[in-house]
Amino acid sequence: MKSLVLEKKDEINLRDFPAIDRVEETLGPRDVRIKLHTVGICGSDVHYYTHGRIGPFVVNEPMILGHEASGTVIEVGAEVQTLKTGDRVCMEPGIPDPNSRATQLGMYNIDPAVRFWATPPVHGILRPTCVHPEAFTFLLPDNVSFAEAAMVEPLAVGVHAATKARVKPGDNAVVMGAGPIGLVTALAALAAGCARVYVTDLSEKKLEIAGSLSAAITPVNVKSESVVDVVKRDTDGWGVDLVFEATGSPHAAKTVFEPLCPGGCVVMIGGQPDPIQYDAGAAMVREARVENIFRYAHVFPRCVGMLSSGAIDVKPLITRTFEFSDSVNAFEIAASAPPADVKMQIVLPQ
Ligand code: ZN
């Protein structure tokens, strides 16, 4: 039973990992056992590989990577009601403490005790099987593929961001960054009712993909164009209603209010390993609302519903697929940040 193990910073191996069999593979009455099918490579997985840590989360012991997953139920616990063997599913990777104050208040994503796959010391799911609570495992309609289902996790971030932004029909938005999270945010903002979404990046290839997603997306290469100029030109100088920051770049964070209209909202999404600064004066004169998001809560069924209905199509975001046996190579490629790739996925042997 091979797993993809991050031994320490800069070292990944595909190898047997016996500890996981004993500790984390016991099926409780309300758990299901899942055979993994497709796992997306996330920026966070790559960051642990290249840096050995994200903020306070440090890889001190070998850890299995991966948290964006779909698979098939192969065993159900005695009290499981909604799932059965053979069901195709996707999984929400964070399991909160059901009795915590944050969970009781409906904010289980910010429960300090949440156990989230591939966040030290919790193992991820680049392994043949896993055990997961029924409550965080979601049935897939027949028309949602395993590849699309493994995109539900990043899509959930975009949907949570659009929800926090309180998008209204006809809003205009800027999404800073055309990586996977920027693009799922653009798709979620459109699904929530935006009339136009300007997506910025430095990579022409990523912007090409952005532009191909919808006629309502305007790609803006900030290497050659100012997004503020483009927005002001299109909105009679007023600005956009919403700005989503999805680059994680301190430089971009400094400029978030520039394209924003008076009374607009900025949503900070991009992971910020270091403290960032933004212009509070620019926020003040606009009476801007600022939202910060951390992962998501209560959105997986909505994401599955939108993939099934066609309201959102994530397929163009999946730019490369690797066999599990090739996953060390996949991570090396992902770590080189190829400009033409958005989401890379790994398919496990079935
Ligand atoms: Zn992710």
Image (cartoon, rainbow, N blue to C red):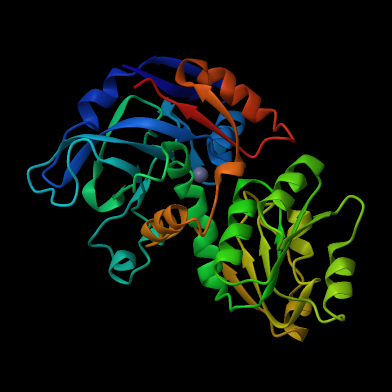
Spot occupied by residue 341 in the image (x, y as percentages of width and height): 67, 35
Which residue is nearer to you in this view: 317 or 175?
317
311 left or right, relative to 189: left
Which residue is nearer to you in this view: 150 or 59?
150
Residue 67's image quarter? Answer: top left
Which residue is nearer to you in this view: 260 or 350?
350
Spot occupied by residue 55 in the image (x, y as percentages of width and height): 56, 46
Which residue is rendered at x = 32% and y = 72% of the image?
105
Which residue is nearer to you in this view: 132 or 207?
207
Which residue sits furthest left?
A: 78
Reply above or below: 269 against 11.
below
Q: Is residue 271 visible?
A: no
Q: Is residue 348 visible?
A: yes
Image quarter where the N terminus lies is top left
Reply above or below: 288 against 47.
below
Reply above or below: 232 against 110.
below
Which residue is rendered at x = 64% and y = 53% of the image?
182
184 left or right, relative to 17: right
Spot occupied by residue 348 in the image (x, y as percentages of width and height): 40, 24
84 left or right, relative to 177: left
Residue 15's image quarter? Answer: top left
Image quarter where the C terminus lies is top left
Which residue sits furthest right?
A: 224
